[in-house]
Amino acid sequence: MLFLAHVARRYAPSTDLGVDLGTGNTLVHVRGKGVVVNEPSVVAVNRNDRSVAAVGLEAKRMLGRTTGDVSAVHPLRGGVIADVDLAEAMLRRFLRQAVPWARRYPRPRVVVAVPSGITELERRAVRSSADAAGAREVYMVAEPLAAALGTGVEVNAPRGAMIVDVGGGTTDIAVISLGGIVADGSIRIGGQAMDRAIVVHTRRQHNLLIGEPTAECMKIELACAIPEDRPRTMEVRGRDLVSGIPRGTIVRSDEIARAIHEPIEAIVAAIVRTLEATPPELASDIVDEGITLTGGGAMIRGLDLLIHERTGVPVRVAEDPLTAVVRGTAAILDEFDRHEDLLRV
């Protein structure tokens, strides 16, 4: 029996996992299988005993709809872990979902993508969560480096490449050369800041109270960084602030452009600051190669055009920008020895 167990472990499928632990969504890549988990980073928790009622998409559907005993919360805020216990429970659930046979095989080696501006305290929280979730070894990689690898950039080349990862809680910007980050910027502004701005705009301009899930839908359908020739419209339902009665209204894309103007401008300003801090030779490379946008925010219409207009540098949106970071963690696992210098233990 011991021999059979040894053989089973030796020839077990790889348990190497890449994780993009994001404020908005968590993605898990299983080596050899691809992305097997893509779920909202939301946990529904019982207020009385702190037990977890639901995780992921099921929990997100409860946002704004829970009873008094259950609340749906984001364990990560601003790109980092805000509630370690809930983050551990969420990550444990996602890892078991990704590797359901994990109890019979060795515990996984995990590479987690984290914001480039993460503090040591926040790094310990990530490591603690992954350890508690069942990881054998935990490595961390800066999100811009992972995003670069996920989009096919040769990060070890003696040539500058600029990555802008617009996530849910943070926007990470990095100029990469020779396997390292030469200049970077990380601001805690991303998709969720835009959602909050849309909530505020709808309340002020339409006297209508909506929740962040509705605001996120409005952002996906209507958000644009520059005015459009033909504004799009969407019917939005919420609670009237005067009468208290549910009602609907029509919202235009040009309104949403004005609503998210401030966070968009903050992102563009951070990109400009990073370019100003870039050494001249690498800046020349970036003019030739352009800026690569990744993350969910990269899909906002016209964001690439706005950045190009403000910087004069070509801008491209990565193919499937939502999964660029987790694909980068997978690339690290595929050639671990080659990319080991990129990791933080």
Image: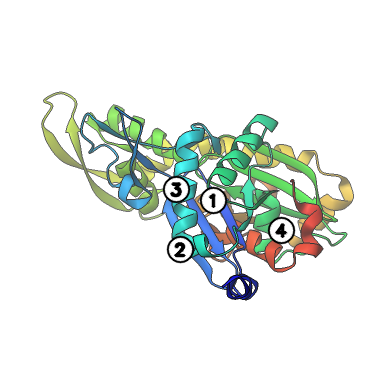
* Rendered location of residue 17, percent (x, y): 59, 60
Q: Residue at x 52, y 58 (%)?
A: 28
Mark 1 vs mark 2: which is more N-terminal?
Answer: 2
Q: Quadrant of residue 182?
A: top right
Between marks 4 and 2, how big is the CA–CA gap? 41 Å
* Pointer 3 local density, CA inside 10 Å: few below 14, some 14–19, many at least 20: some
> Would residue 228 be visible to someone looking at this image?
no
Cβ atoms under marks 4 and 2 closer than 8 Å? no
Disc 4 versus disc 1: distance between alpha carbons? 14 Å
Residue placed farthest to the top in the image? 242
Task: Answer left or right for 89 relative to 294.
Answer: left
Task: Give the residue pinned by disc 2.
Answer: 100
Q: Which residue type carries mark 2?
A: Pro
Q: What is the distance, in whole Å, between disc 1 and disc 2 at their CAs?
A: 39 Å
Marks 3 and 2: which is nearer the front? 2
Q: Nearer the viewer, residue 144 or 336?
A: 336
